[in-house]
Amino acid sequence: MLRPYKRKCKSEREKSEMGYENILYEKKDGIAYITFNRPKVLNALNNKTIEELRQALVDARDDSSVRVLILTGAGEKAFVAGADISELAQRTPVDGKEFSISGQSVAHTRTAGSETRHHPGIWRIAAAGAAVRQGRCARTLSYW
């Protein structure tokens, strides 16, 4: 039986076990937990958060002991609000498009790409304490 995963904020832990600043990433009993950890900005995705997410997904994919990946957001108001508008406002239209493409490419860092006879892939679960925003975020998660 899976017990609810307690979401942690930066105030509880400055950095996650693997040294990330904007996500918490831990592995326990065959489950990898990724928590978006920017509750003051409703877990908005900036460039650093996207890169940390990519690194954590690759680590989970390459670890044959990981069987389940759970994504969640810190705080009580949002899973992920979407792109960090304050960061986007400083970009040119071309830079903004490149940032968008880079962020969307994280969905193609498929954890299921590690399927072998001994490691049939990873189940992905988005566990949101608050409602998951409909639209791009929900569509992106459906690829996982």
Image (spheres, rainbow, N blue to C red):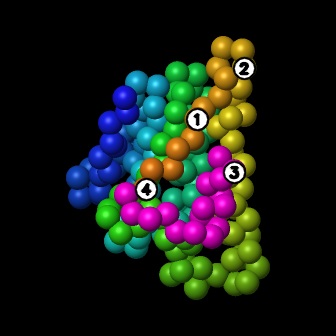
User: Toward which corner of the image does residue 100 lie, by quadrant?
Assistant: bottom right
Magenta span covers which residues?
129-144
Q: Is residue 107 magenta?
A: no
The reply to whether dot 4 and dot 1 touch (C-beta < 8 Å) is: no
| In the depicted structure, whether residue 6 falls above or below residue 78 | above
| In the depicted structure, whether residue 76 falls above or below residue 13 | below
The residue indicated by pointer 2 is 116
Question: Position of 62 compared to 80: left or right?
Answer: right
Q: Which of pointers 1 and 2 lies earlier in the amino acid sequence?
A: 2
Q: Amino acid type of disc 2? A: Thr
Q: What residue is shown at x 66% (from left), y 14% (from top)? A: 118
**Helix, strand or loop under label 1:** strand
Q: Amino acid type of disc 4? A: Ala
Q: Amino acid type of disc 3? A: Tyr
Spatial CA span between label 3 and label 2: 20 Å
Q: Which of pointers 4 and 2 lies earlier in the amino acid sequence?
A: 2
**Helix, strand or loop under label 3:** helix
Mark 1 surroundings within 10 Å by alpha-carbon count, few (fewer than 14), some (14 through 19), many (20 or more): some
Spatial CA span between label 4 and label 1: 16 Å
Q: Which of pointers 3 and 2 lies earlier in the amino acid sequence?
A: 2
Q: Which mark is residue 123?
A: 1
Residue 65 visible in the snapshot: yes
Question: Position of 103 compared to 73: left or right?
Answer: right
**Helix, strand or loop under label 4:** loop
Residue 23 visible in the snapshot: no
Q: Which mark is residue 128?
A: 4
